Image (tube, grey):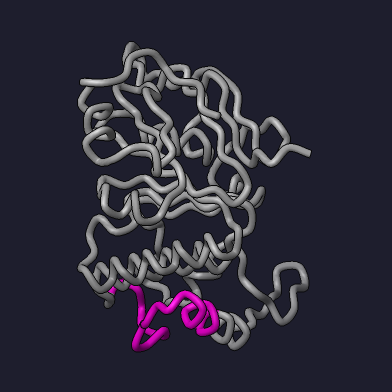
Amino acid sequence: MSDIILETRGLTKRYGGVHALEDANFILRQGEHVAVVGDNGAGKSTFVRQVTGVEQKSGGQIFFDGQEVNHTGPLEAREAGIETVFQTLALADDLDVPSNLFLGRELYKFRLGPFSWLDRKAMRDRTLEALKTTAVKIPNVDNPIRNMSGGQRQCVSIARTAAFASKLVIMDEPTAALGVQETAQVENIIRGLKDRGIPMILISHNLRQVFDLVDRIVVFRRGRIVASLNKHETDGNDIVSYITGVKGGADAAVA
């Protein structure tokens, strides 16, 4: 049985005449953590949007957990086992922490047609357990998300992803707006995912973070994959050379 959890073959996305992603061949194996790096507009987030079904691809194939998939939206991708932290966080400002963690997968005491009763205690208890497991500290989980700091909001989004992680986690710049302490907290969550054997794609501009957390680094430039490097066989200067175009040419096959 193959250990490949995610593979794209010739994945392409065009917006009119603009080629945002071109012929991207990518492989992620079970338990592997891979960083996707590149300059702004290199195609990193476009790649994630195709994999998670936020947008529909223009060409190519996506294989997830051994099957070719064409997710029609992020909910379908999530149901298949892909948990994602988007830059937009996708949180409901007027809801509290438990309601956000269980948004779209609420727990019910009973459901009878149009009549249903949420099991708020169970959701709150499981939220506290998830926050404890991920070491995320929220002083009052009953507060609406809108009353929380940017760092707390980000940590809630990441805790939600880590708590429900099943087959694959994708994080798009998870620490971009965080302070030093909150960044360290998120990095510990990522290490916890690694310990649990959950594969992850990390999009990050922070090369220190990349080298600390992942096994392999995939470089995007102008919509193409130009390098796939074992972190122990490269360094920051080498990665920057690929990002800026000093090194790299045609799309690289990723193994």
Of 105 and 223, the residue lying toward us: 223
Q: Residue at 25% across / 55% down in the picture? A: 176
Image position of 52 (left or right of 204)? right
Is 144 covered by the magenta stretch? yes
State the image coordinates of residue 76 (x, y, percent, origin top left). 62, 46
Residue occupying the point 44% across, 41% down: 216
Q: Quadrant of residue 36?
A: top left
Could you say where residue 54 lies in the image, as x and y percent from the top left? Answer: 48, 39
Q: Is residue 242 left or right of residue 122?
A: left
Q: Is residue 126 above or below residue 90?
A: below
Q: Quadrant of the C terminus?
A: top right
Of residue 249 and residue 55, the one placed in the foreground of this image is 249
Q: Which residues are magenta?
A: 127-146
Q: Residue at x 51, y 27 (%)?
A: 254
In this rendering, is residue 54 above or below 142? above
Q: Which x, y percent locates residue 144?
A: 36, 78
Say left or right for 225 vs 28. Answer: left
Residue 49 is a magenta residue: no
